[in-house]
């Protein structure tokens, strides 16, 4: 059993000045008309943005520009830009939390930076300075601290994005690019909060393929899922569960990783199962963190759990069988935006695979993991240095 | 043998006013500072743009806006736009030619419009009015007619693009969008003109897969090819030849369709082979047109050819065998931008599959097809109504 707690790409120190994002040269222009804060309970995910954004641009002759923090504003892009024509576009999802000490913090941000570097490299975008980008993000969070809601389960969602801006139609890598970071205060990803979601298993459309880009956070992975999502919605399901291959392996849910909690035959607690990082699965930070927690005896004991984390290929047929045997205890959608949300129903070829429902919305495993990870993220508990101060 | 001469998606008449692009309401704002024309021989593909662009926007409550022709200018886009974050972006490649009669014409533009409608539907973009969009394109061409080079093999490349502009980070279809058309005078796609190109066969990365988007012209199909293209370039090859599956089926070259000309065992001329439209192959307009020409006895007789068009799965191993048997007469990259270009060398796993070279750059099959299609495109020959006047 291999526990992959790291994103697959290692931060490399910029090997020359040109690929260095120099935070000491940050230019700051603050807005003259700060917006009014939005009442947290009325927030809809990803629709309200803060006063400022962070920006830097890359040119092959001069490298990364001096970074800027400036008022949130539309981008001005050539209509022939690579990102619009050929989708040379990668992003990250992160959150900033306000601790009980009143300080802003990020959750394992170095994993996001490694992944961002890897995503950009996969699309042949200019080299990303993950360390410099992280410093820039921290500075943006400091300026936007008033936007972090103090309610538990609320945070400031951060969206670092890199787009290729080469203004030419020849099919070739974009050697010029723009990095920008926008920030959006948010509460629960799903409007129903902790209530479970239903998923429709789909195999006629496929999210990712070996040799494709499913293991990276590239924008082009997402829009092909919009149509299947509409199909799921029309059939009364909240999300798509992507199957893969002849054997209908279970991969991911919409834009989130997926776990199942399965009673072990030997009576020794539960297997905590998710698909392996074979290049078709996004190496999620929440995924890595839940696997690490599930393998931690101290966490298990404190939570009264006995979890055995397993990264393995499993199929929709396994889910059918585990459900019919009464062994499918919980199913979970997990990710930065959604944190941990229960699945109560899996549709497949006109039938429904039932997953036990719990009054609290989440079952004991999902609830314990969600509470633990939120406590760490919100700075209420220290754990392995996962929560990183922005100051 | 199935000859697919049509793009897979049928134009449907807009079923209500909201999805109708009303060309009678076209707003025109001409530039006050027309640019100087660029000498055709100095053009590099897709880098010079004309004075104007065509634009329309879609909103779910009001449908398509009155279309506009206005000075070419940068777009103003929210940093959270769907096209930048999730790559809801589709496009077409078309060309306008100046006939001997001095009139501007397009080549089978209805096929592009059908494909554009299908691409947008695949990404759950708003409904596209192909007929209205074509009228808009024709009007743009009329205004930009001075930009069409009169040299043979030169034309005005047109890039209709539709981008999702929903400014929200929740992963969901973009119900608002922008259609724009930009135009770029161009000569040969490859700087070396008619000289053959070399291709490196690649199977560790894949362009498209069943259930994906390879059969549609969506932007996200292209940027994942930039890295393999760089690998090919480093190894001295011009383009990537995409293989697929365990059996290494030959699919496409870079962003172009691929054909091989193979001597038949029965002595009855040549098989003219390309991969079938199984959802992983772009249904190219040039592809459909070459298949139609190759099946036309009048064309074959006039050109002194005996071609048997075949859409079938074939593998890199077939290419190796045909080459070693001396049966691989020609290999061709074809597409709107490149028209017809010969391949003289196919790299595969450190070896080279040789394709006979011809002094003229193209072999007899490629040359006859290229000359015929250019004659039709440039309005020097009438054929099946393929050349469509813009007036």
Image (cartoon, coloured by chain):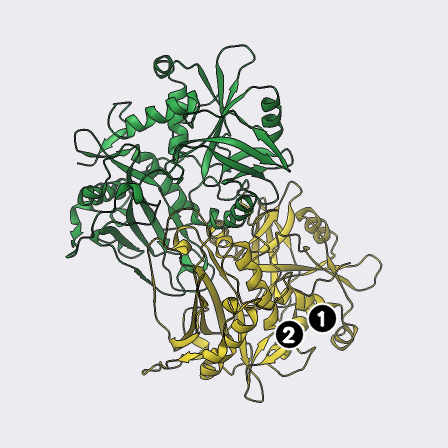
Chain colours: A green, B yellow
Within-10-Å neighbours for mark 2: few <14, some 14–19, many 20+? many
Asked if the residue under mark 2 is in contact with the one under mark 1, i.e. CB atoms within 8 Å, the reply is yes
B375 to A95, vertically: above or below: below
Classify the position of the C terminus of chain A by image quarter: top left
User: In the depicted view, which residue is nearer to us: B263 or B106?
Assistant: B106
Q: Which residue is painted at 41% across and 30% down in the image?
A: A287
* B17 left or right of A79 in image: right
Q: Is residue B339 at all visible to an observer of this figure?
A: no
Chain of residue at mark 1: B
Whole-percent x, y for residue A286 in the image: 38, 31
Callout 2: SS:
helix
Callout 1: SS:
helix
* A64 left or right of B196 in image: left
A217 to B345, vertically: above or below: above
* Residue bearing mark 2: B373
Q: Which residue is painted at 16% across and 46% down in the image?
A: A24
Whole-percent x, y for residue B379 in the image: 61, 82
Residue at the far top: name it.
A267
Mark 1 or 2, nearer chain start? 1
- Residue B61: assigned label: none
Within-10-Å neighbours for mark 1: few <14, some 14–19, many 20+? some
* Residue bearing mark 1: B293
What number of labels is visible? Answer: 2
* B290 left or right of B199 in image: right
Q: Is residue A65 at all visible to an observer of this figure?
A: yes
Query: For the residues tagged 1 and 2, is the chain the same?
Result: yes
User: In the depicted view, which residue is nearer to us: A285 or A156?
Assistant: A156
Chain of residue at mark 2: B
Instruction: Give the CA separation, mark 1 to mark 2.
Output: 9 Å
* A206 left or right of B305 in image: left
Whole-percent x, y for residue A212 in the image: 52, 44
Whole-percent x, y for residue A318 in the image: 60, 26
């Amino acid at each position: 059993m291999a526990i992959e707690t790291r994103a697959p790409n290692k931060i490399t120190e910029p090997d020359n000045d040109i690929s260095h994002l120099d935070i000491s040269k940050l230019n700051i222009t603050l807005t003259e008309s700060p917006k009014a804060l939005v009442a947290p309970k009325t927030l809809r995910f990803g629709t309200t943005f803060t006063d400022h954004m962070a920006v830097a641009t890359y040119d092959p002759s001069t490298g990364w520009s001096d970074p800027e923090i400036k008022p949130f504003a539309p981008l001005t892009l050539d209509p022939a830009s690579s990102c619009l024509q050929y989708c040379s576009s990668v992003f990250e999802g992160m959150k900033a939390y306000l601790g009980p000490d009143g300080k802003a913090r990020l959750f394992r941000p170095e994993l996001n930076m490694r992944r961002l570097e890897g995503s950009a490299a996969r699309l042949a975008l200019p080299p990303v300075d993950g360390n410099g980008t992280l410093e820039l993000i921290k500075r943006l969070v400091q300026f936007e601290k008033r936007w972090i809601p103090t309610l538990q389960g609320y945070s400031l969602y951060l969206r670092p994005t890199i787009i290729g801006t080469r203004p030419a139609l020849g099919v070739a890598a974009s050697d010029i690019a723009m990095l920008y970071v926008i920030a959006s205060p948010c509460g629960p990803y799903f409007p129903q909060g902790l209530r479970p979601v239903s998923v429709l298993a789909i195999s006629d459309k496929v999210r990712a393929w070996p040799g494709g880009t499913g293991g990276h956070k590239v924008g082009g992975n997402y829009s092909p899922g919009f149509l299947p999502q509409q199909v799921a919605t029309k059939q009364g399901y909240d999300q798509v569960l992507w199957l893969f291959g002849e054997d209908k392996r279970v991969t991911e849910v919409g834009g989130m990783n997926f776990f199942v909690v399965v009673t072990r035959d030997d009576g020794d607690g539960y297997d905590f199962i998710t698909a392996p990082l074979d290049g078709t699965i996004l190496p999620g930070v929440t995924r890595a963190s839940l696997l690490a927690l599930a393998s931690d005896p101290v966490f298990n004991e404190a939570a009264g759990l006995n979890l055995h984390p397993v990264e393995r290929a499993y199929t929709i047929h396994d889910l059918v069988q585990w459900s019919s045997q009464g062994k499918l205890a919980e199913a979970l959608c997990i990710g930065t935006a959604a944190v941990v949300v229960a699945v109560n129903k899996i549709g497949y070829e006109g039938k429904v695979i039932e997953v036990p429902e719990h009054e609290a919305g989440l079952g004991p495993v999902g609830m314990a993991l969600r509470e633990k990870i939120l406590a760490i993220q919100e700075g209420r508990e220290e754990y392995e240095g996962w929560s990183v101060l922005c100051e």
